[in-house]
Image (tube, helix red, strand yellow):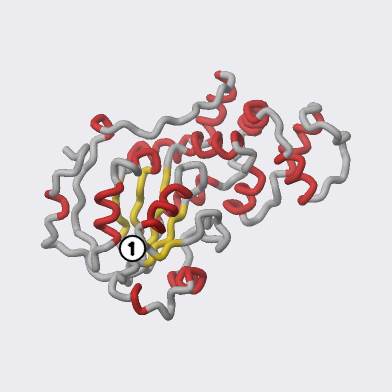
Amino acid sequence: MLRPAVAVVSPGGVGSSHLIVTLGERHFAVNHFADNDGLKHLHRPPKVSSLYSQLDLSRDPATKRVPFRAIYLFDQPIMAVASHFRRHFWPVQALKLNQRTCSTPDLFNKLVAKGKIRGVAPNSVVTEQERKKLYKDGFDCTAELEEYAHLGRDYYRLEESMHRWLLEDTTYDRILLHGAYQEHLMVPLLQLLSMERLPARLPVWDKQLLEPHSHRMPSLSAEAMQELVSTYNQTIKLVDSMPLLSIRYGTEAPAPDPDSDFHLQAFPGTK
């Protein structure tokens, strides 16, 4: 059986778990939906050899007919960050995307000082493991996100991570997919993943013709929302300018096929 090798990566909060499960059900060799292999939220695009090693595909001949590809899911950064806070994932997610700081202690200390974390006295010495548990025990996610917004700093290094995945060159092909529209784009995505050579041109999807997955907007004050917008302004503009589905061709991947008629197919939502 042909099992194209795919790694699905995202900053989190944009539907990557759902896509990984969907691809697995369709017999793609894909990374773990719960990130047990550490691939789902990589801070930057790695070398293809390391991805093959972690997917354990190097000796699987069934994957050789179709080159390895990565799918990067993106969405507006404020929606991603709000999702992390709503599910109390943000300390762990900050560690995965940041790779240099641990669980954002500055925010933790501010929450303690304002009495928002029960059972911790100001200036207490709290280990990283204890801090994660205290966050996960459950507090008002809107209050936490409000505090994060007022810090005015991208503690996730989410902008840097998204810019690297969207703009850096890699040896392998990357398919860039807007997470909020993945259900509409599943048919063309599956076709692309099964091609030995990706097409040189893609159709153009019109956001006005498609209904995105509904976001749960955080109930923040106007001031906090404006501060988040200011913090993530560059990436908000970048995401607004991105096609819903596009390709960054790998420097060592098979050359794109200029004769493919893929761009002529009448997928729903195309112009």
User: Could you tell me residue 157's position as x and y percent?
Assistant: 57, 47
Q: Residue at x 33, y 63 (%)?
A: 173
Q: Residue at x 24, y 64 (%)?
A: 195
User: Could you tell me residue 95's position as x and y percent?
Assistant: 64, 51
- Type of the residue with mark 1: Asp
Along the viewing direction, whichever of 171 and 66 lies nearer the viewer: 66
Q: Secondary structure at mark 1?
A: strand
Q: Is residue 191 left or right of residue 169?
A: left
User: Could you tell me residue 136's position as x and y percent?
Assistant: 70, 41
**Relative to 197, residue 223 above or below:** above
**Relative to 135, residue 9 above or below:** below
Give the image quarter of residue 223.
Answer: top right
Q: Which residue is mark 1?
A: 173
Instruction: Please indicate, yes or no, whether residue 169 appears anywhere in the rendered image.
Output: no
Instruction: Please indicate, yes or no, whether residue 197 appears anywhere in the rendered image.
Output: yes
Q: Is residue 119 left or right of residue 252?
A: right
Q: Residue at x 45, y 44 (%)?
A: 15
Q: Residues within 10 Å of mark 1 (few under 14, many from 20)?
A: many
Along the viewing direction, whichever of 216 and 257 lies nearer the viewer: 216
Quadrant into which the N terminus falls? bottom left
Give the image quarter of residue 48.
Answer: bottom left
Q: Residue at x 25, y 51 (%)?
A: 188
